[in-house]
Image (tube, rainbow, N blue to C red):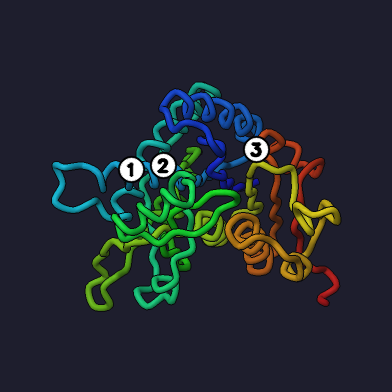
Amino acid sequence: MRLVVALGGNALLRRNERPDAAVQQANIDRVATALATLAHDHELVITHGNGPQIGLLAVESAADPALSAPYPLDLLGAQTQGMIGSLLARALRAALPGRHVAALVTHTLVRADDPAFARPTKFVGQVYPRSQARSLARDRDWHIAQDGTGWRRVVPSPLPERVVETDTVHELLNSGTLVICAGGGGIPATADRDTGALSGAEAVVDKDLTAALLAEDLKADFLLILTDVPCVYSAFGTPDQQPVLDATPAELRRGTFPDDSMRPKTEAAARFVERTGGLAAIGALDAAYEIVHGRSGTLVRPDLTGG
């Protein structure tokens, strides 16, 4: 079976952890252990988030006196793909001796006129107290929004249209290679109408929506979205909270989920199932094997009744 696995940002850095290289390495080792059991029996394509990492690089770039201007988000996204891809590739090679593993830098096409460019909503970087966040917003011309009890930078998140290197990913899969790609949703780029030349875009693409699009184009059988909760919950965080263990795309869309966390995941799962007739699931990283075998997580399946 061909699986596309979307790792949440918590795979490398959990909330409030220091963004040290050693911390991320330890978390990556946990990822490799969780995914190695799946890789023995299935073709895997792994995507990942990059919110904490790109936010850290953006802060460092903005504060670097050697630069006349900070690096744009598309280039920072490319840097995170290289770093996270290297960490994942090394850990997976160690966990899967003899298996070919490739980390591929990939671009995701977006529309230059996407309305998202005028409405920044994607959280990047660390959490700040309100006063510090407001100060940073003034000094660095950031947009900020509340995230839980703190505040974070938000940037545009246009919809993905196509992963440019999809054909290359397909060839690697057909050769038996485990592929790491589309990190952080892919490097956002627009294409010239006449020449097709790519230009970077000042944005971060949602990694779950990119994973769903990539899974569709690769004709994957299963989209697995891994996060830090065991399943989707209705009325999350309230006294009426209930686990959602099985749902159709329509049932998921009738639910109310936070726009900045579970909503993109449920939408990505719904889109993949609707467009392909395949299966998707959302659940905890450490239960990846159990989720694929129907023993954990939220399964998203086609509506066989046609209703």
**Circle 2 residue:** 53
- Name of the residue lying farthest toward the front: 131
Q: Position of residue 98 (x, y in %)?
A: 49, 23
Name the residue at 51% across, 28% down: 92
Task: Identify the image quadrant of residue 161.
Answer: bottom left
Closest to the observer: 281 or 218? 281
Can the viewer see residue 245? Answer: no
Q: Position of residue 60 (x, y in %)?
A: 29, 41
Say above or below: 81 vs 218: above
Name the residue at 69% across, 55% down: 280
Q: Position of residue 46 (x, y in %)?
A: 52, 43
Closest to the observer: 64 or 134? 134
For the residue labelled by badge 1, is the local secondary structure a helix, a strand or a loop? helix
Q: CA distance from mark 2 to mark 1?
A: 6 Å
Q: Amino acid at mark 2?
A: Gln
Say above or below: 13 vs 283: above
| Label pair 1/3, CB-CB below 8 angstroms | no
Tell me which label, 1 or 3, sits earlier in the chain: 1
**Circle 3 residue:** 285
Name the residue at 58% across, 46% down: 5
In the displayed structure, does residue 190 sit left or right of residue 256?
Answer: left
Q: Which mark is residue 57?
A: 1
Q: Amino acid at mark 1?
A: Leu
For the residue labelled by badge 3, is the local secondary structure a helix, a strand or a loop? helix
Say above or below: 106 vs 291: below
Count residues near mark 3 (Cα–Cα under 10 Å), then give few for <14, some for 14-19, many for 20+: many
In the image, which is nearer the foreground, mark 1 or mark 3? 1
Q: Amino acid at mark 3?
A: Leu
